[in-house]
Image: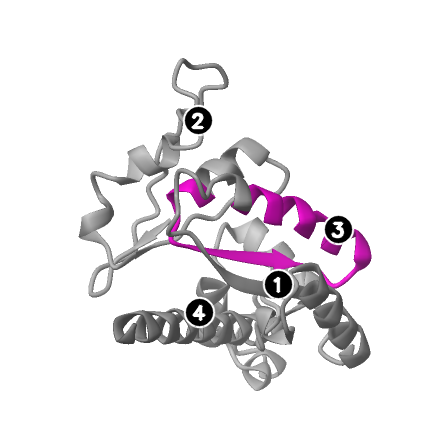
Amino acid sequence: MTYSTGAQPSTRPLPVSLPRRTRDPYGAKLAVAHLLEPIAGDYDMILIDCPPGDETLQTAAVAAARWALVPVKSHKSSRKGLGAVAARLDAVLGVNPTLDFLGVVLVDVGTSAHVVQREAREHIAELFNADNNVVFTATVRHSEATAQATRERGLLVHELDAQVRKGPKWYEIRRGDAQAQALAPRTASSVADDLQAITQEVVARITAVENQESLA
């Protein structure tokens, strides 16, 4: 998905061909970079969202990226996958030396699970040999209802939130003046707020690093 400041976001899928065998040893790694090169100058920021488990696509994505942001759940089995992600980042530095690790975002967390979050932050920091700042302050809460509603309606969370806000009020439904929305969880607003907080922290972290680099 690509975004440009001052313009509507483009969600047109871009075809990606990742050759497994090629005379060029970097062909598969640089497939996404070559695909984005002609259009990159038209956008302020391009976001590449990778599905879990596809190592080839993830490698190609970070080979094209300036920043890497890793979402992870708090439980141990999910954190174990971070080791493979870290190795994947190291593996592309030869073709993409400007790649920088922006941090880890805890997702699908319980808002009241403070001890679980603290322990997860400590384990992640230890894995990356860094302080707890490697993990974003903002998190994305668990909401199965919101996740199901976005899948059922084919909407992003903020789009679902907008539909919920435009929907009838509870007292209108109770009076019989309106019907309740199907698959319109009230938690959509909270999850949308979480994602907005993540976005703000992403911008703040990138800005801080760019300011430091300009002074160097």
Please tell me whether residue 64 belongs to the stretch shown in magenta.
yes
Amino acid at circle 3: Lys
Q: Mainly helix, strand or loop, the magenta region?
A: helix
Which mark, by number, is residue 28? Answer: 2
Q: Nearer the viewer, residue 69 or 166?
A: 69
Please tell me whether residue 23 belongs to the stretch shown in magenta.
no
Please name which of the two marks, 3 or 1, marks the residue nearer to the observer: 3
Amino acid at circle 1: Thr
Q: Is residue 160 above or below residue 211?
A: above
C-alpha span from label 4 to label 2 = 28 Å
Dot 3 or dot 4: first in sequence order is: 3
Which mark, by number, is residue 80? Answer: 3
Q: Residue at x 67, y 52 (%)?
A: 82
Which mark, by number, is residue 128? Answer: none
Dot 3 or dot 1: first in sequence order is: 3
Q: Quadrant of residue 75?
A: bottom right
List the residue tagged with mark 4. 202
**Count of marks placed on residues:** 4
Residue 1, position as x, y percentages in the image? 38, 49
Q: Which stretch did the figure color magenta?
A: 62-89
C-alpha span from label 3 to label 1 = 26 Å
Q: Quadrant of residue 211?
A: bottom left
Which mark, by number, is residue 146? Answer: 1
Q: Secondary structure at mark 4?
A: helix
- Determine if residue 142 is in view: no
Q: Residue at x 35, y 35 (%)?
A: 14
Dot 3 or dot 2: first in sequence order is: 2
Q: Residues within 10 Å of mark 2 (few under 14, many from 20)?
A: many
Amino acid at circle 2: Ala
